Image (cartoon, rainbow, N blue to C red):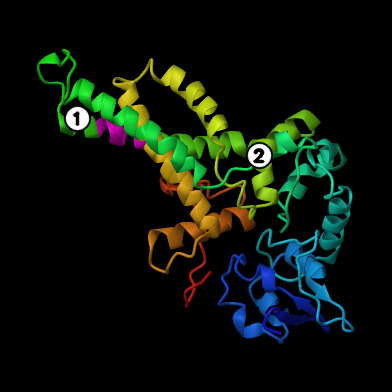
Amino acid sequence: MAEQFHVKFAGANYDIKQFLRDHPGGVNTLKNFRGKSILAAMQKFGHSSGAYHMLSDFKVSEVDVNLTGAVSENGRIITKGEAGRDWQEVAFLEELEARLDWSKPLLRQLDAIAPDYDTWVNSPVYRKCRLFESPILESMTFTPWFLVPMVWLPIILYLGVTQFRQYVACGDACPKDSILFSTYLLHVVCGVGIWTALEYSLHRWVFHRNPGKSVTMIRIHFLIHGMHHKVPFDGLRQVFPPVAAMVLTCIIYTPLQMVFTYPVIKLTGGLIGYLTYDMIHYYVHHGSPKDGTYLYSMKRYHSNHHFVNHDKAFGISSKLWDYVFKTFVKVRQLGFSLQW
């Protein structure tokens, strides 16, 4: 049926219709398998135990092939590349997931998987995640992507214009430390550069800091970044909430303003860098970039971080600092273009 996309595996039928566009390997790598077996392809491309485990949630019974194919509450997506199947690992992932009730808020249940949190949080699932019992608190965890530019563009424009008028287009009222337009641009670019270093540092050493077995630290980690790795396709939790971003900006800016000259101009550049990063991050998860473009390269690179090397490839808007700190990952070259 047009509303279904059945594939076969080990003699059973699976409807993967809703997973097609989110498949890290693109839609076009799956479209020729409608009604066919995917066993050989999964083995050829080294799918993980998590990928085999995911299939159980797309299974359609032989006597009820007209099911709508809705993704179930246990859908699991690719975690890391490895050849063959490790059924013991698949069974462990299933047991680990069964410790939690996804129909209830997860934050208070994380003690159940605390000893194995790192394994659990880096085994992504294809579902929605509720954090809090309170509807008010829960609503505060959702951020539509367009809210970010709506909040930050006016702030960036205000800072940029006021600083330009104060130090460049100031006429007879120019202060002693007035600067040329070219110097102004240099400070803005410097601010963007500072952001790229912060982006890498926060992602690697804060967001990916191992929380150990402390339930409190695990809950904090899950809130700030672990949730994104567990449910990476939740479109309402992929950009930074503006209030949290403002708090973080104040924390970071306070010490830096004592070190750098013209700190507000550099802050303007830093916020430009941040806004670019957040929009790129959302796009590499949900966009459909064309082969040969920068964003196509970054989408594949970021997918590698989520599903193959979660301890590498920390750059999202740029790979620069991955080269510097030797966490760069070379993504497999393909003889065809991926399409999403």
The residue carrying mark 2 is 141
- Mark 1 is surrounded, within 10 Å at the Cα level, by few (under 14), some (14 to 19) or many (20 or more) other residues, namely few
Q: Which residues are magenta?
A: 186-193
Mark 1 secondary-structure assignment: helix
- Measuring 61% from the left and 48% from the top, which residue is drawn there? 236
In the rendered image, residue 95, in percent from the top left (x then y), is placed at: 88, 55
Magenta includes 192? yes
In the rendered image, residue 125, in percent from the top left (x then y), is placed at: 73, 56
Instruction: Residue 244: name its quadrant.
Output: top right
- Measuring 81% from the left and 44% from the top, which residue is drawn there? 116
- Mark 2 is surrounded, within 10 Å at the Cα level, by few (under 14), some (14 to 19) or many (20 or more) other residues, namely some
Instruction: Residue 308: name its quadrant.
Output: bottom right
Q: Given contact means CB atoms under 8 Å apart, are the residues at marks 2 and 1 in contact?
A: no
| Residue 183: numbered disc | 1
Q: Amino acid at mark 1?
A: Thr
The vertical placement of 99 against 171, above or below, is: below
Mark 2 secondary-structure assignment: loop
Q: Residue furthest front?
A: 136
